[in-house]
Image (cartoon, rainbow, N blue to C red):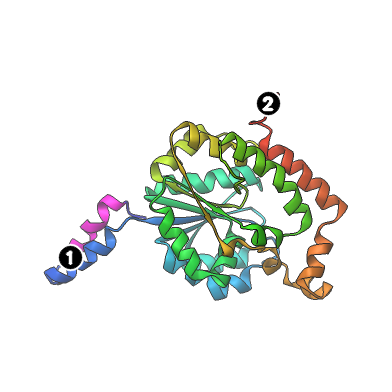
Amino acid sequence: MRTLQNRCLTVNLFQKTDDSTKKRLCDILDAPMTMLTCGLHDPHGGLLWIAKKYADVLTKIFHHVHMTASPNTDPELLIWLQEHGCTIHHRRTNNIPQTYFEAIQRGVETKAETIFYCDADRALHWARTYPAELKRAAAMATKADYFVGMRGPKEHQSHHDALYYTEQLPNAIISERMEEKMRRDYLSGCYGFSQKAATYIVKHMKADSLSLYGDWPLIMKRHGFKPTYRICKGLGWETPDQHTDDVERLGSVDAYREWLSSPAEWKRRAKMALEFVEKITPNS
């Protein structure tokens, strides 16, 4: 990936190109680069069908698409994504905080002006359901140091109960620490950073637990990066896209939603909720 400073120089390679065409190419190549960087975990290749249909939406909206994949993500999916314009980074361990951290770090290394993070399953779901909105969100992120894509009440409630209800208190706590007058959604898995803001994230964030969800909004606040919030319809529940076999077996998305909120899932989500805010709560 060439840095932005060098992109216009590549035009000089085309010696036979007329001056007006060279100028148009320079305008295109010198436009601010927006990179989509995603964490990807899909052991069974459930996202392959949606990637084949909608990954091109992502590569058309963003200048560069990068996937940081868990070690047990389906190889066929990774090969297909790589053959169709995505850069793949293979992690050696399956660690959610480290995946987030490395995804942002890759964006910093590309020198992209805007680094747009979205979980891979969410990004593909968004491309399938509200592609024009995704394009608008990406454009909005280029005008902000710190962009937070939020789920509205309808979109958040479309998720299974174990996720929805256990995320309410962490979001309320983070919002209070951010001195927001209303509750915001910091757990959506959709964030945008300017190059400068992302550099601060990489420098100051410790990716040793899920507390990064509560930590990095406050890192942004401490360093003067004002958040820009946007409710996005495309951030509705994405998980059924990846588990179509379970949805078919159970008969409907509603049945799958109810089945997924098992006692074990409630316990797992409650533990995650505590971890989200453990570093920003008093006496933690």
Q: Is residue 252 visible?
A: yes
Q: Is residue 211 visible?
A: no
Magenta span: chief secondary structure: helix
Residue drawn at x 39%, y 53% is 142
Name the secondary structure under disc 2. Answer: loop
Q: Nearer the viewer, mark 2 or mark 1?
A: 2
Whether residue 174 is situated above or below residue 263 in the rendered picture: above
Q: Is residue 67 left or right of residue 176?
A: left
Label 1 sits on a secondary structure element that is helix
In the image, residue 42 sits, relative to residue 277, either above or below, namely below
Q: Which mark is residue 44?
A: none
Outermost residue toward the left? 19
x, y percent for residue 62: 42, 62
The quarter holding residue 43 reads bottom right
Q: Tell whether label 1 touches label 2 (CB within 8 Å).
A: no
Residue 11 within the segment the image draws in magenta: yes
Q: Residue at x 63, y 53 (%)?
A: 70
Quadrant in which the C terminus appears: top right
Q: Position of residue 222 (x, y in %)?
A: 48, 31
Q: Closest to the observer: 252 or 152?
A: 152
Residue kind at label 1, given as amino acid type? Lys
Dot 1: few (<14), some (14–19), or many (≥20) neighbours within 10 Å? some
Q: What residue is disc 2 on?
A: 282
Magenta includes 199? no
The percent position of residue 2, horizontal first and vertical second, equals 33, 54
Magenta residues, as a range? 4-12
Q: Label 1: which residue?
A: 23
* First in sequence: mark 2 vs mark 1: 1
| Residue found farthest to the front | 181
Residue 142 relative to residue 190: left or right? left
